Amino acid sequence: MEKIYDEMKIAACIANSKYCAVLSSMDVDFYLIKYEKGEFVSSPFQDELLFQIVEQGSISIYFIRNDGTRYALSNGTADYFLGDMDIFYPKNDNIYVEAAESLTCIAFSIEKHREMLLANNKFLELICKSLAAKIGAMTTMDAAPTSLAERVMSYMKYKCADATLKGIEQSAFHLHCSARQLQRILNQSEAAGLVRKLGKGTYKLL
């Protein structure tokens, strides 16, 4: 991830944006963020609340349930909003946004400018349209078909602190499988070099 504060580059991106008229009227501290493919653009691990507009590239947005099931929420390209829900609600701990390719976003801090954002009718009109489109898309979403092995990997990556599974019985309960099934998958994953056993009932995702 690279943050860019060059005023000429920022102005050029805003000028090329679909939302140029609204953005140009806003007194906020804009900057650009560049992401490499596979980097998280937004995740529960990030502390800073950012409003971001995709300027170039594309993103993949998905939801991870506690049992490791992954739901594809949306794909976004140029002009897609990120952080619109964070203006009004606490950050969701299960939603991840990943750069599907090299990505550039126009960004600014939500916390720093929240009062101004809530008082800007033109900006709120854009947010309402964005949220309405997202709600419509969510009504048709479904869980991506995944095997138990894939769910175990997702569970370790997204739900376990430091990607480390601790306790076979408790983890099997969350994954809706038997302890024997989970142990078999962990043994297979260890043999394949995907996880490393740290101790009894403790495995780290590599």
Image (cartoon, helix red, strand yellow):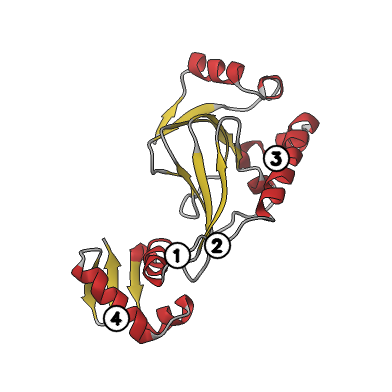
Residue type at mark 2: give it: Ala
Give the CA distance from mark 2 to mark 3. 23 Å
The answer to whether one can see residue 118 in this image is yes
Q: Nearer the viewer, residue 26 or 1?
A: 1
Q: Secondary structure at mark 4?
A: loop
Point out the tag, 3 or 1, that comes first from the N-terminus. Answer: 3
How far across and down, in percent of the image, does residue 31 sit?
A: 52, 27
Q: Are marks 2 and 1 in contact (CB under 8 Å)?
A: yes
Q: Are marks 4 and 3 in contact (CB under 8 Å)?
A: no
Q: Are marks 4 and 1 in contact (CB under 8 Å)?
A: no
Quarter assignment of residue 199: bottom left
Marker disc for residue 201: 4
Q: Secondary structure at mark 3?
A: helix
* Circle 2 residue: 143
Instruction: Tell me if 150 is positioned left or right of 135 in this view.
Output: left
Q: Secondary structure at mark 1?
A: loop
The residue under the point 61% across, 22% down is 17
Give the CA distance from mark 2 to mark 1. 8 Å
